[in-house]
């Protein structure tokens, strides 16, 4: 698939996704970038690890800022604390090049992703096994102040 076709596919996937699917995509992105950062640290590619950790951090910030505290203050407070912990571990990993900190963040991100997937299935009334995270693609989406799918 060409870069342009790949970008267009991603744009369409994001634009047609349900809010539940978008949340799952955010988890997938954070997991993918954190894993890539961990791999980069292992081969002492600190520039790449920094870039990937910052991307993962931006996604976590986006998830935290998307919480609707009015709907359920208690649940949102707990999720905000989890996202804060994940974010701090990713920052720590970036400052100290500590893969154990990335592992801490990944453990929670993977658990949250699985929980989210099961919730989606329960709401839809299905019992299919949790979907696997999307395979890595050459085109990574950017997350900044607002979500952007352009490369």
Image (spheres, grey):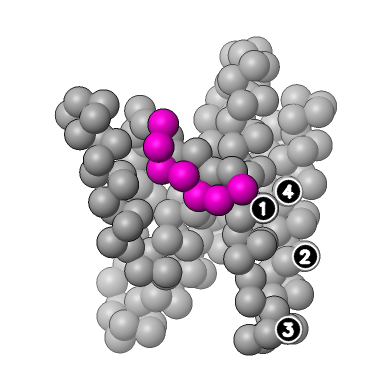
Instruction: State whether residue 93 is above or below residue 147.
Output: above
**Highlighted range, magenta:** 145-151
Seen at 54% across and 37% down, the residue is 33
Proximity of marks 1 and 4: CB atoms separated by less than 8 Å: yes
Separation (CA) of disc 1 from disc 4: 7 Å
Q: CA distance from mark 4 to mark 2?
A: 10 Å
Q: CA distance from mark 2 to mark 3?
A: 12 Å
Of helix, strand and loop, which mostly describes the magenta segment?
A: loop
* Classed neighbour count for the residue bearing mark 1: other residues with Cα under 10 Å, few (<14), some (14–19), many (≥20): some
Q: Position of residue 106 (x, y in %)?
A: 61, 47
Of callouts 3 and 1, which one flags the residue occurring earlier in the amino acid sequence? 1
* Residue 34 on image: x %, y %: 58, 38
Q: CA distance from mark 3 to mark 1?
A: 18 Å
Q: Please give the residue where the numbered disc 2 appears in the rendered image.
A: 81
Q: Report the residue marked by disc 3.
A: 73
Query: Label 4: which residue?
Result: 87
Residue toward you, 56 or 149 = 149
Circle 2 residues within 10 Å: few <14, some 14–19, many ≥20: few
Let me know if residue 42 appears in the view. Answer: no
Closer to the eye: label 1 or 2 = 1
Q: Residue at 77% across / 38% down in the picture?
A: 91
Query: Mark 1 or mark 4: which comes first in sequence?
Result: 1
Which residue corresponds to mark 1? Answer: 61
Element on which disc 3 rests: helix
């Amino acid at each position: 698939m060409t870069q342009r076709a790949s970008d267009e596919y991603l744009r369409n996937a994001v634009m047609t996704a349900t809010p539940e699917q978008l949340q799952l995509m955010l988890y997938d992105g954070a997991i993918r970038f954190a894993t890539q950062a961990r791999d980069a640290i292992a081969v002492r590619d600190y520039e790449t690890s920094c870039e990937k950790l910052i991307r993962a951090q931006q996604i976590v910030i986006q998830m935290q800022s998307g919480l609707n505290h009015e709907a359920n203050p208690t649940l949102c407070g707990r999720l905000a604390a989890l996202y804060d912990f994940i974010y701090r571990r990713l920052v720590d990993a970036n400052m100290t090049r500590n893969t154990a900190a990335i592992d801490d963040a990944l453990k929670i991100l993977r658990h949250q992703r699985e929980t989210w997937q099961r919730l989606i299935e329960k709401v839809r009334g299905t019992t299919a096994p949790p979907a696997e995270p999307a395979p890595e693609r050459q085109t990574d989406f950017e997350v900044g102040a607002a979500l952007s799918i352009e490369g």
